Image (spheres, rainbow, N blue to C red):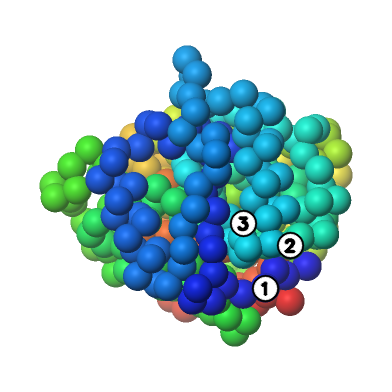
Amino acid sequence: MLADRLKPGDEIRVIAPSRSMAIIKGEQLRIAQERLNQLGFTVTFGKNAEVHDAFFSSSIEERVDDLHDAFADPNVKGILTVIGGYNANQLLKYIDFELIKSNPKVFCGFSDITALQGAIYRKTGLISYSGPHFSSFGVKHGFEYTLESFISAVTNDAPYEIFPSSHWSDDPWYLDQEDREFIKQDGYMILHEGQAEGTLIGGNLSTLNLLQGTEYMPSLENSILFIEDDEESHPLAFDRDLQSLLHLPDARGIKGILIGRFQKNSQVTEEALRMIIASKKELKGIPVIANVNFGHVHPFATIPIGGIASISAHGPSIEIWVEQR
């Protein structure tokens, strides 16, 4: 199920189903709202978006209320999460999935929000978007690739390519917007050659794994699995998290894998990735592409969970095309 495309004049609601907006600097919020306004969107905020407790989140009830209000409000056409965190999965058994199914809308965020997105797709069939948070729109420099991909994903129906950005950055941009380091990107990395087509399922790997064994886990049948993790991961953690996913019965239905670029502090190097993937006999014969533009480094693509991807990796040639249907 595909929500109506966003267009100028539409209202976008900002909610905080994980960490609170209270942790975001005011200047970052100003830039984010101004950028969305310049695109022609009206930005409104959930009534509990700035509420916070000792963990810089808010109660389950407050977060669920804002989620339900955003989907129920007929004036709201798109929903952006403020930021990620650790506890979005607390909300799952309290969500009215029938409300969401009856009011399909563009819903975008990443990281901890993967728990909500996987559950929404499993329960409703609604395509949601692994892409920028509202706070991501507050990036002052080097945001062009991220913005172009977001617009391609949520404002039209045409297929679009997830191509390598010219540069990438792993710096703490939110601490100093002017002190940025951009690294030249050499393209994506082929771990296994091949080509495949399938349904895009994934997001943050450690968060997606929280859904295993629950009624909220999306099927991996005929899937293109896309996975990433942040600097709290490391080679051994990524290895076992991926292995855990591959033990699922329907993991036999994975047609190909896309791996997002890791933050440098994770120490998941290209050499480590090659060793990890080579150890997975379950992945023999399917294409695996790494250092793809999504995850916790900038810039990053917007990927529709439940959309269709066609991937091809042969020699120096790599193509990743996305359709929404």
Q: Helix, strand, or loop for circle 1?
A: loop
Amino acid type at mark 2 = Pro
Q: Quadrant of the C terminus?
A: bottom right
Residue drawn where x is 66% and y is 27% of the image: 60
Residue drawn where x is 50% and y is 73% of the image: 9
Instruction: Examine the image and state in which quarter residue 128 appears.
Output: bottom right
Q: Is residue 201 left or right of residue 188?
A: right
**Residue 70, percent across and down?**
64, 51
Identify which residue, 208 or 277, lies in the foreground. Answer: 208
Residues under labels 1 and 2: Cα distance? Answer: 8 Å
Q: Give the tally of numbered discs.
A: 3
Would residue 260 be visible to someone looking at this image? no
**Residue 163, percent across and down?**
44, 73
133, above or below 158, in the image: above
Give the residue pinned by disc 2.
Answer: 104
**Residue 178, percent across and down?**
14, 50
Residues under labels 3 and 1: Cα distance? Answer: 11 Å
Q: Are marks 3 and 1 in contact (CB under 8 Å)?
A: no
Which label was assigned to residue 4?
Answer: 1
Q: Are marks 1 and 2 in contact (CB under 8 Å)?
A: yes
